[in-house]
Amino acid sequence: MDPHLLRTLVAVARLASFSEAARELGYTQSAVSQHIAALEQDLGAPLLTRRPVAPTAAGERLLEHAGPLLLRLDAARADVVRLASAPPHGLTLAASPTALGPVALAALPSAGVTLRVLGRDGVSAAVAEGTADLGLVDGLAAPSDPLRLPDVAPLTTHGVGEEPVGVLLPVDHPLAGRDGLRLGDLADARWVDAPEAGLPLSELRAANGGHGFRPALRYEGADVRVLTSLAAAGHGLALLPRSVAAGAAGTVAVPVVEPRLVHRIELVFAGALSGAARALAEALSPRA
């Protein structure tokens, strides 16, 4: 399948419009229609309904493959360009919000740094595509276990830090005085789902055998202070690294004692490092 045709399909399905997709991609509307028709002829199945514009069952299935395929193509291009070109000046670091701890911030060069705060999957994608030299991504894991990162390209990862996690509660919550909490006992509590600003509820659910942890409120931003304010106001509990949760106004962070879980941060990069990227990687993880 021609990747140009796949990109056209993704754009039409996302925008639900042939004309809007043509405007975004810089094609004429007739060219977009020809792309979709050629792809449908190649696969022998209709991929989109026209009125309204929406994926068919076959189109939905192809779209599931299209995103990872196109990302992998972009990663391959970036990998070759990275190898063939002279190392760029400066450093671009992509990081998830709660991966930017004091150690990482202190290790940044004094000049020439571009810091991109992204979602966890976006960090790996940025490194794979070559829009970031290094990535810092975090998540929930058993002690010393690696994170499960998306398979977007041949990336190298190194653990750079682990710390305990705590459940963030309002100061007047009935459990605020506990010395520790079992995660399973909180499966039916009210939670704030903040997949970018905090540790995602999907990871808590996985640690609890796939059950519970339904959100009372969903926050789609990346500002950790907003998340702690929501918890303080009683909109739901949140799970955060101890260093992030400590001192949040109006809250108490109670450690999780069962199961044994830690907040883990990993360094992510592609290929051989040089210059500022190598210096930062060695400062954070000598093994890199």
Image (spheres, grey):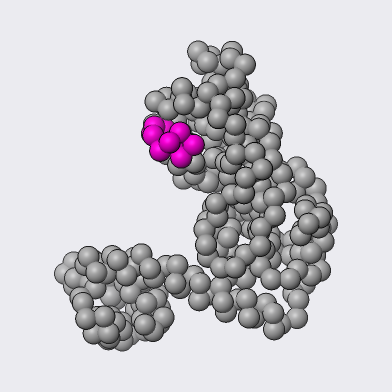
Give me the residue at 66% from left, 58% from top. 157
The number of callouts visible is: 0
**Quick one: 30 or 166, which is closer to the camera?**
166
Q: Is residue 211 magenta?
A: yes
Magenta region: which residues? 205-214
Give the image quarter of residue 193. Answer: top left
- Say whether residue 57 is visible: yes
Left or right: 249 as drawn, with respect to 46: right
Q: Quadrant of residue 133?
A: bottom right
Q: Is residue 193 visible?
A: no
User: Where is 144 relative to 183, above or below?
Assistant: below
Q: Is residue 265 above or below residue 275?
A: above
Q: Is residue 286 found left or right of 200 in the rendered image? A: right
Residue 140: percent from left, percent from top: 57, 41
Magenta stretch secondary structure, dominant? loop
Residue 270 appears at what percent x and percent y? 66, 68
Asked whether 8 falls inside the magenta stretch, the response is: no
**Residue at the location (53% across, 35% down)?**
227
| Place of residue 35 in the rendered image (x, y in percent of width and height, measured from the top left) | 31, 84
The structure residue drawn at horizontal position 69% and vertical position 79%, both measured from the top left corner, is 83
Q: Nearer the viewer, residue 195 or 185?
A: 185
